[in-house]
Image: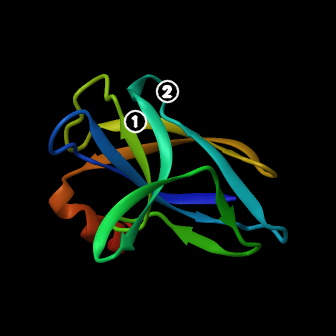
Amino acid sequence: MAVSGAVIAQPVLGERTALYFTITNTGTEPDTLLAVDVGDLGTASLHASEMDDGVSRMRAREALELPAAGRVQLRPGGLHVMIEGLTRPLSVGDTATFSLRFARSGPMNLEARVVAYADLLDVLDSGR
């Protein structure tokens, strides 16, 4: 399992934000992302933004299926990790640690950097 491009959107309002990254299943078997933990930064949960009668809604996801030799991108307007109850301010350039727990691959400890919301898509698309 490989994770790349992890970024957190700088919070615009309130005590919530989102974490985005790309997961590549380098294995020959499907896997499942079971949980995301952002430590003392707040609480994290998987979400998907979906259109429902012309209205965008966020729906919690219990898990995220990862196909064998497949890639899943978490991006604005789609899959993402919602971080709520932020315990500290986040400024552009800050970093935060998080961990992912997979059914087959086990846990991974990672780091994400905070980027301005206005720059989010450019950063995700460029991989920088």
Q: Mark 1 points at which residue?
A: 96
Residue drawn at x 81%, y 52% is 104
Residue 52 in the image, given as x and y percentages of width and height:
37, 72
Find residue 120 and report its image quarter: bottom left
Tags 2 and 1 in contact by the CB under 8 Å rule?
yes
Number of disc labels: 2
Q: Quick check: 24 left or right of 45? A: right
Q: Quick check: 106 left or right of 46? A: right
Q: How is the image coloured?
A: rainbow
Q: Quick check: 31 left or right of 7? A: right
Residue 44 in the image, given as x and y percentages of width and height:
47, 38
Name which residue type carries label 2: Gly
Residue drawn at x 61%, y 49% is 62
Residue 2 in the image, given as x and y percentages of width and height:
64, 59
On the question of residue 6 being in view, the answer is: no
Name which residue type carries label 1: Ala
Circle 2 — which element?
helix
On the question of residue 55 being in view, the answer is: yes
Image disc number at residue 39: 2
Which of these two is toward me, 62 or 8? 62
Residue drawn at x 15%, y 41% is 13
> Badge 2: how crowded within 10 Å, few (<14), some, or many (20+)?
few
Sequence order check, earlier mark of 2 and 1: 2
